[in-house]
Each structure stands twice: as structure tokens, then as C-alpha cells.
Amino acid sequence: MVTSEDPKLEKSSSVKITSCFLHQFLERQRKPGKSKLAALADASNDQKQDKGPIGPDGVHSRLLTKRQLLEMAGEIRDLSKKLGNLRLKLHVKTVFLLTKAHDETLIIKTRDIAEWLLSKERDTPYIVYVENTLEHNKIFDASGLIAADPSREGRLKYWDNSLCATHPQTFDFAVTLGGDGTLLYASWLFQRIVPPVLSLSLGSLGFLTKFDYNDFQDTLTKAFRDGITVSLRLRFEGTIMRSQSKDRSNSRDLVDELIGEESENDFTHKADGTYEILNDIVVDRGPNPVMSSIEIFGDDEHFTTVQADGVCVATPTGSTAYNLAAGGSLCHPENPVILVTAICAHTLSFRPIILPDTIVLRLGVPYDARTSSWASFDGRERVELNPGDYVTISASRYPFANVMPQGRRSEDWVSSISQKLNWNSRQRQKAFKEWSEN
């Protein structure tokens, strides 16, 4: 069932959607003569498959033309606004559970949710996937869980990183138990298609975890029965580009290779790994004792050269993470922007900048740099960048589908930074007491 505060949308017939609803919808939306809501309904009838919203599958966003990048970003923003006013009822049969497998308390809580989902009392015989490390975990006691009810045989299954990467359409719905770090791990596991993720708060701050674990039965029952509201969070696509030049002497110039006369040469650099990230991409000095020298490019323009400990490029979602610690701006997650903040820049004039999400950024290590730099993606996959190497950063074709409480989307974010970070918290200024001769 799809409901909305918009009366025009309430007239739509009920629809059921698969875990790939986002990309199927974007594909249908591009067909002439189709309304967006009709496209959503049509997408529900397709079998699950791995698609991208534009172009052939496998084309990275950094390779798109400016027009294609604008169209892609516009379609995703338009869909995000639509989904913010819709309640989507998913046909959920397969549930993915993610927790910290080394935390004893969370393992017990994960078992409780799995047992509740596998119970005969549920209207749907759910298939539940937990991490494969829990299969023989004594605390989780998978064998005891199945022995308690023979009908659970075959419905408790196990996932690994490979399954998430190659067959993300296996899962209709994901539930995380933990904090924002656990949610970031979910984003890391699903590098392309992401099932709707509902996060149960069991962490420290919890900007992204909006649901109380103690209410999980009521929360999941309403989500499966009444539908969910989804917030599409912008993700970045980051690609390591390796210099193919055997001559890495000071005579070579990275600026000339990327935007000068040598930019027409397709063989100066070669891709060496692409990652989808939800928070930030950081290029820093790593274990080196001296500052990093980093060239920053935007599209076909050389922006500046930064002498600093590093540069943090954050999504709006990541504005409250490393970006905040480095002095960057807080940014509402619905803003379509890229935040660039230097980390301990050795200058008095560098200020954080905010760029549109239609720009393709490149952060490179010049050939004459004294040392190499290191790139990290959401705090993972730390990779060394040698002189001549660079990282491309662009808006991803695969946003992160985060399940939100009904209503109060903007108010919820402001409330979060006020409560979690004590934003603008100070004693109120006292009023003057007017003096009177009487």
C-alpha cells in the first residue's frame, strides 16, 4: 500500500516492491509516457536484477558526461523527494541482520530478533540471514534455535562479504544492531544495490540510527505491515587512479597530465579499485612524518594545491563525522553537495568549501611531492598513493536507502545535532531590567 500526504498520490493503487525498487524505478522513469508513480508500480512486477539508474551496467559515474551526471543526480534527487512523502509497503520475505559479531551483548540481541522473525507467530515465513561467523558461535547457538522449532530448518541462513557484493538482490530488507559505524559497515558491504536499511540504536551517538532496540517487535511489525518511509542518502564513488608512467621524476607535472595538453592521453593513468562510500574519502599523510602535498581538481579545472595533514571530502551524511572534527560545515543530509575540508592546513587562508554534487573531484599527489599519501574510504581500505597517483570522487549512482520514522525529516536532523552535539548550546542572555526613578 502506498500512502502520502499529497492527495494526488493517494489515488494510486497498492503496489508491492522488491529490494531493487530504487533502480528499477529509475529505469522505468526514463521510458517516455510513464508517470513516476506508474513507473514505481511497473517496477514492482519485475524480477530482482542488478541495474544502474542510467547507462549500461558497469559504467562508473566518473566516466559520465556532464549532462549525464546532471541527469543522474536530478533523477535521484527527484526520487528522494517522492519517497519522502510516500509510505512504501515492501514484499519482505528475506531479512538481512547485521551486528558486531565480536560483541557478546549484541549477539544475544541479534539472536532474539532472529528468533522473533523465525517464530510461527509471524504471518510470513521469513528467511533470516546472519553473519557466517555466528553459525558456530556458542552464544548465538544456531543449532539450539533450530532445534526449538523444526519449521525453522532451512530458514536460518548465513551471509558473507561475497554474497553481499555479488548478490545484493538476495535480501529484501536489512536490519542493523549497533551505532552509526554498523550502518557504515552495511553501506560498505553493499557496494552497489542497497536494500532498505532499518537501524536499531545500540551505539554511542547515533545520527543515523533512529529506532529504539527495545521496541523492535513493534517497529518491525509496523514496517512490514504498514510500510516504510525511505531517505535516500547520497553516496560517493571513489576510484584509485594509478600513474602508468615509469618516469616519476620532478620533470613530470600532474596538472598537465589531467587538464593540460597531456590530458588527451588515455594511458597516463589506470583505474585500480572503485568504492562506494557513505561518509567520507580522506587523503592524508598516513605514517609519514611530513605534510602531504595534494593537488585538487574539479572537472577540468585545477582548484589549488594543499599543504596539510590531509583533505577530507565528505557527503552531507558525513558532515557530522571527520569533516566536523576537521572544522568543516554541518550540512543537512538532503543537500546535494560535496564538502571539502583541509586537515590541519599549513596556511591561514584555506577555508572549507561546499561544491555541487555534479562535479567530479580529483585529489592527486604531485610528482615532486616529498612523500606518498594515503587514501581511506569510510575509514576502510587504506591505500597508498604514490607520486602521480590520484583519487576521483563523484556522486554515486547507488544511494543508500535509510529507513526513517514517519514525518519530521528536517526537524529530526536538527534535533539530532542539538541533542548529540549540543549545537548552539549556551546560557540564554538575560534581559535588561529598565531603571525607573519611581
Image: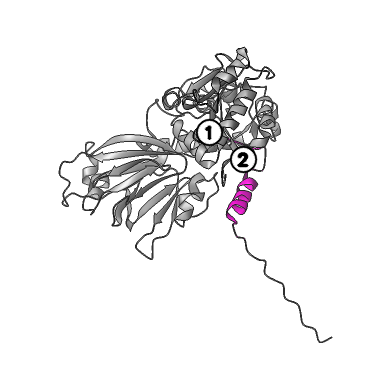
Q: Is 21 displayed left or right of 149 in the figure?
A: left
Q: Is residue 415 magenta?
A: yes
| Displayed quadrant of residue 113 | top right
Whole-percent x, y for residue 353 in the image: 43, 55
Which three-letter amino acid code belongs to the residue tagged 1? Thr
Where does label 2 land, which residue? 210
Q: CA distance from mark 2 to mark 1?
A: 16 Å
Q: Nearer the viewer, residue 248 or 146?
A: 146
User: Disc number at residue 382?
Assistant: none
- Please identify the quadrant where the N terminus is shown: top right
Q: Is residue 114 magenta?
A: no
Q: Residue at x 48, y 46 (%)?
A: 337
Where does label 1 land, which residue? 99
Secondary structure found at label 2: loop
Question: Which of pointers 2 and 1 lies earlier in the amino acid sequence?
Answer: 1
Q: For the residue carrying disc 1, how many other residues have a C-alpha within 10 Å: few (<14), some (14-19), or many (20+)?
A: many
Secondary structure found at label 1: loop
Regarding residue 64, the answer to whether it shows in the image is: no
